[in-house]
Amino acid sequence: MTNWATKTRTLRALGLRNVVRAAGYRLGVKLGFNPVRRLRARVPNGPFFLSAQTNSVVNAPAVSAWQTSGVLFSHSQIRLTDAAPEWLTNPLNGQRVPRPEREWWLLPDFDPAVGDIKLIWELSRMDWVLAFAQRAMKSDENALKRLNEWLADWVDQNPPYKGPNWKCGQEASIRVMHLAIAAMMLGQIRSVAPGLRDLVRLHLQRIAPTLQYAMAQDNNHGTSEAAALFIGGSWLFALGLPEAESWADLGRRWLENRADRLIGTKGSFSQYSLNYHRVMLDTFCMVEVWCQRLNLMPFSTSWQVRALAATEWLHHMINSVNGDGPNIGANDGTRLLQLSETPYRDYRPTVQLAMALFASKRAYAQPGLYDNPLQWLGVEIPAEIAPAPKNYVADDGGFAILRRGAVMALLRYPRFRFRPSQADALHIDLWLGAENVLRDAGTFSYNTEPEWLNYFAGTASHNTVQFDGRDQMPRISRFLFGDWLKTECLQPLRNDGKATNFGAGYCDSYGACHHRQVSVYSSGLKVIDEVKGFANRAVLRWRLMPGDWSPLPTSMGFRLSRGVSDEFGLSVTSSVPVKRFELVSGWESRHYMDKTALPVLEVEIEQAGTLTTEFYWTV
């Protein structure tokens, strides 16, 4: 049980204003003070989209999804017919939301009868609107007909402000952004079907009254909801709705605020997550494209600078060969603006678009599928190429990237201005070219058995040291850790000609301390871990890419190799006796709601000491 002192320190770290905002929102909704309780609106009538009214010729292909099959979290396929999906049914277990006619605020946050509510929300994020709009731009009248039929069914099954798909302001915001971008692609910004105008309006009426709760989260809820108010408000104002101007102004003000508060000068985002970083950056890209297309007043220079810093941060993280990157931080499967036939874990479309918008450069020189979003959005592909990623330290979020040729190592160290979602201090990711050799576990699900919630967010699912079988920080609730760690010693990035070096360390609230020094060579990685202050045991874990790994004792310590040719291996030596050197089975989640096994090396000691791990490979 977490003590009150820990909870008090954590509330202070969250910020009194945010705590008051969140508490005020919950109390206001519960007691009926918040105007969101008084919202009423009629179901809008279709059609929602007219025939394409643009002369733009796009050579890029439309995405293939949402024809005979849909995709959940950009990974799990479900079968489709021409008829609209079941918006209120869990597509994996067939369980329908009980009594969906209830007002959204009467529904529980976590209903065991339904399972993970994200499985209900996923289809209603309306990724399919973009896919249908793409095909309609290519004169596919059936796609336009299907688009209108699905939207008509959605509003019929999800009447305004009733049921689970109205429960979250961010989910409503994602719909607004997708509807607006589809209208832009189809040339229907200035000439809009009344049904679409009314659908956007009732969404903005839902988002605005609960905006303070989104801001209290200090995450992408705020950026998404501010973006929807800005995009939707400026759109409706241009269509002659004078009251929409206040929504647009509110959205602009909070977008400026969020960029300044949540994005550091080196580009780190408040959620310390690769995928949530993409969500934020895609949102900013949609805002910028919308602003340019409607000839609206540009955002401030400060906003543009933070957007560029966030772009460069993601550029440094991503492997240019396959577009993948470290599976760090929380990851709920969100991917906005799906305009290219690229895998979920390919982040290059976002990097290429953001680099074009905020730097007037392209991140990747060779033409590829990552260029397709620019074509669909009418963004010119710049001639100038951005510099290739090099060593990079984003101290504002606790990320150090060490490169040596095709080798990249990421060290995650604690710089928590905002609440951490995972106990991943001093985790290391290692990449050899496009291969992710040392891996993070990911997330799996936000609503699953406690065993999995604790595992994937906990210290045991990262390449670091765990003390006494506990997490590095005590868990307070499903999404909150307490006693946030602080980096107490830092060895700055240094390149001595032979290796690239970096180091960091912390002591936790129990008095256990871990210092890690990392050196990256062209054909090796050396990690020195100094640990002390724990009660009974310290376990060092290396989470390895799947393969035929074999542990072997040696005179100098212990060795683990993959395959008979020793193309990759590691050795561990210790200054104190090693109680256990064991290859066990662990888990990773590369996509939301999906987990697979992988090998994990565990090295256990029972007294303070130094563990030295040397990785080696054949170039």
Image (cartoon, rainbow, N blue to C red):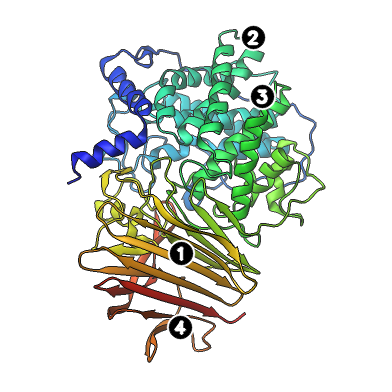
Which sits earlier in the primary sequence, circle 3 or circle 2?
3
Inter-mark Cα distance, 4 to 3 = 61 Å
Could you tell me residue 210's position as x and y percent? 41, 21
Q: Quick one: 184 or 422, which is closer to the camera?
A: 422
Pointer 2: what residue? 240
Asked whether residue 1 appears in the rendered view, the answer is yes
Pointer 4: what residue? 561
Question: What's the residue type where badge 1 is placed?
Answer: Arg
Inter-mark Cα distance, 1 to 2 = 52 Å
Q: Eyeballing the image, is 561 above or below 526?
A: below
Q: Quick one: 494 or 300, which is closer to the camera?
A: 494
Inter-mark Cα distance, 3 to 1 = 47 Å
Question: What numbered label is drawn on residue 439?
Answer: 1
Which sits earlier in the primary sequence, circle 1 or circle 4?
1
Question: What's the residue type where badge 3 is placed?
Answer: Leu
Mark 1 and 4 residues: CB-CB less than 8 Å, in contact? no
Pointer 3: what residue? 50
Q: Nearer the viewer, mark 3 or mark 2?
A: 2
Q: Quick one: 533 or 279, which is closer to the camera?
A: 533
* Local secondary structure at mark 4: strand
Q: Eyeballing the image, is 413 above or below 53?
A: below
Q: Nearer the viewer, mark 1 or mark 2?
A: 1
Residue in the picture at 44% in, 51% down: 329
